[in-house]
C-alpha cells in the first residue's frame, strides 16, 4: 500500500502539493557561490539562541491560535520552524541569505535523517504559504494553523534532541 502523502499548503492554505524549484537540491558550494549562504563562524550562543527563539515562536503561535488569528499563528509557526532549522545551519558555520537556500542546505547536510528531511519539506511548503499570507494577505483556516503549530513542535523537538546529541559528542 502506498504511503500517505502529507498535505501541503499554498496561497490561502489550499491543500495542494507545492514545492519551490529555487534552491532545492543545489549543492551547498553552489549556494555559497550564489551568495544564498555565507560561511561564518557561529557561536554556541547563536545556536542556543536560535533554538530558544523557535520555542518562543511556538508559544506565540499558540496564543494567536487561541484568539483566532489563524494567519498570524501560521506565520509564527513557520518562523519557529525557520529558527529551529537555522540552529543546524549555525552548527555547520553557515548563515542564510535565503529561506529556501537554508532549507536546501540543511536537507543536504542532514540527508541521512529521514524524519528531519520530511519536516523540512513540509517547512518549505509552509514557507510559500507564509509568503502569501504576509505579502498577498491570504487567509488561513483554524485546522491549517493547528497543523502548522504541531509541525513546528515536531521540528523543534527533532532538532533539539539531535542538537543535544551533537553537543554530547563534542564534550566526549
Image (cartoon, helix red, strand yellow):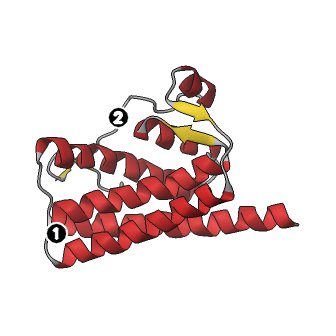
Q: Quadrant for the C terminus, please.
A: bottom right
Q: Please, what secondary structure does the residue beneath circle 2 have?
A: loop
Give 149 or 6, whichever is nearer the viewer.
Answer: 149
Is 129 situated left or right of 106 in this image?
left
Which quarter of the picture shows residue 152? bottom left
Is 69 situated left or right of 37 in this image?
left
Q: How many marks do you count on the picture? A: 2
Residue that label 2 marks: 20
Circle 1 crowding by C-alpha within 10 Å: few under 14, some 14–19, many from 20: some
In percent of width and height, residue 40 lies at: 64, 38
Give 115 or 109, whichever is nearer the viewer.
Answer: 109
Q: Measured along the vertical axis of the image, is residue 41 above or below residue 2? A: above
Residue at coordinates 73% horizontally, 61% vertically from top-left? 166
Residue at coordinates 39% horizontally, 28% vertically from top-left? 22
In percent of width and height, residue 45 lies at: 63, 60
Residue at coordinates 45% horizontally, 70% vertically from top-left? 55
Q: Measured along the vertical axis of the image, is residue 13 above or below residue 162? A: above
Of the two numbered discs 2 and 1 on the same chain, state the one appearing first in sequence. Answer: 2
Q: CA distance from mark 2 to mark 1?
A: 25 Å
Residue that label 1 marks: 142
Which quarter of the picture shows residue 38? top right
Q: Please, what secondary structure does the residue beneath circle 1 have?
A: helix
Is 34 situated left or right of 81 in this image?
right
Residue 104 marker: none
Please say whether residue 4 is visible from this viewpoint.
Answer: no
In percent of width and height, residue 114 lies at: 57, 54
Amino acid at each position: 500500500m502506498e504511503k500517505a502523502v502529507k498535505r501541503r499548503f499554498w496561497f490561502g492554505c489550499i491543500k495542494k502539493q507545492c514545492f519551490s524549484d529555487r534552491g532545492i537540491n543545489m549543492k551547498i558550494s553552489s549556494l555559497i557561490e550564489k551568495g544564498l549562504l555565507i560561511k561564518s563562524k557561529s557561536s554556541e550562543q547563536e545556536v542556543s539562541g536560535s533554538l530558544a527563539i523557535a520555542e518562543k515562536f511556538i508559544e506565540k503561535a499558540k496564543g494567536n491560535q487561541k484568539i483566532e488569528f489563524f494567519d498570524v499563528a501560521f506565520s509564527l509557526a513557520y518562523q519557529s520552524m525557520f529558527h529551529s532549522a537555522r540552529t543546524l545551519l549555525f552548527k555547520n558555520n553557515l548563515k542564510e541569505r535565503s529561506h529556501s537556500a537554508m532549507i536546501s542546505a540543511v536537507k543536504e547536510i542532514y540527508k541521512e535523517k529521514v524524519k528531519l528531511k520530511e519536516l523540512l519539506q513540509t517547512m518549505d511548503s509552509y514557507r510559500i504559504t507564509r509568503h502569501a499570507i504576509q505579502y498577498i494577505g491570504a487567509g488561513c483556516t483554524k485546522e491549517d494553523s493547528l497543523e502548522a503549530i504541531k509541525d513546528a513542535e515536531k521540528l523543534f523537538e527533532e532538532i533539539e534532541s539531535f542538537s543535544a546529541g551533537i553537543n554530547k559528542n563534542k564534550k566526549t
